[in-house]
Amino acid sequence: MGGNELTSIVVSCVLVLWLGWKVLEWIWWKPKKLERLLKEQGIKVTPYNLLVGDMKENQRLLEEARSKPMNLSHDIVSRVFPFHLQTIQKYGKKSAFWFGRTPMVYIMDPELIRDILSNKFGHFMKIKVNPLRKFVVNGLKP
């Protein structure tokens, strides 16, 4: 084995280890850190599931709710948003769930909502969406 081959093997191993570290950080450590930070602020969070978050549970509850006949009442939340209703009932009005790797926070306290929406521009940012998403979701239209 020559010096060049050994160098390329070492560089390849370092690159694979670095890439593995970044992927592990992206799919596990960052969401777990966000979960810990939310809990420190008093927000109850559903347990993080690798990559998919709570989307499987959300889909399962939605299909289950739609498979049953609808009651004749104005209470449609249990049919339209069963996962959200169950999460709020279980974790409270200041809680969060996982949309993939991103935590989504429920805040239903009027005082806290007022505080968030009052003159604190720049503190709460809108989620940035990949611009290609528009073409994938909507398709190419003339």
Image (spheres, helix red, strand yellow):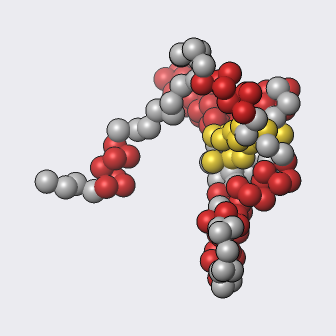
Quarter holding the N terminus is: top right
Q: Which residue is drawn at 82% across and 26% down?
A: 41
Would you say 8 lies left or right of 65 here? left
Quadrant housing residue 89: bottom right
Q: Does 2 sit left or right of 91 as displayed? A: left
Q: Where is residue 68 in the image (x, y as percent from the top left)?
A: 68, 83
Going 53% across and 16% down the picture, which residue do you hit?
A: 122
Q: Identify the image quadrant of the C terminus.
A: bottom left
Outermost residue to the bottom: 69
Residue at 59%, 15% in the rendered image: 120
Q: Position of residue 103 (x, y in %)?
A: 67, 40
Residue at the left extreme? 142
Question: On the rendered structure, is 136 left or right of 61?
Answer: left
Residue 45 versus residue 1: which sits nearer the camera? 45
Where is residue 37? Give x, y as percent.
79, 27
Is 43 rendered above or below residue 2? below
Where residue 49 appears, as percent x and y from the top left, is: 74, 51
Above or below, 80 against 101 in this view is below
Task: Tell me if residue 29 can be seen.
Answer: no
Foreground: 81 or 72?
A: 72
The quarter of the picture where residue 130 lies is top left
Residue sitting nearer the eye, 101 or 43: 43
At x 65%, y 53%, the residue is 52
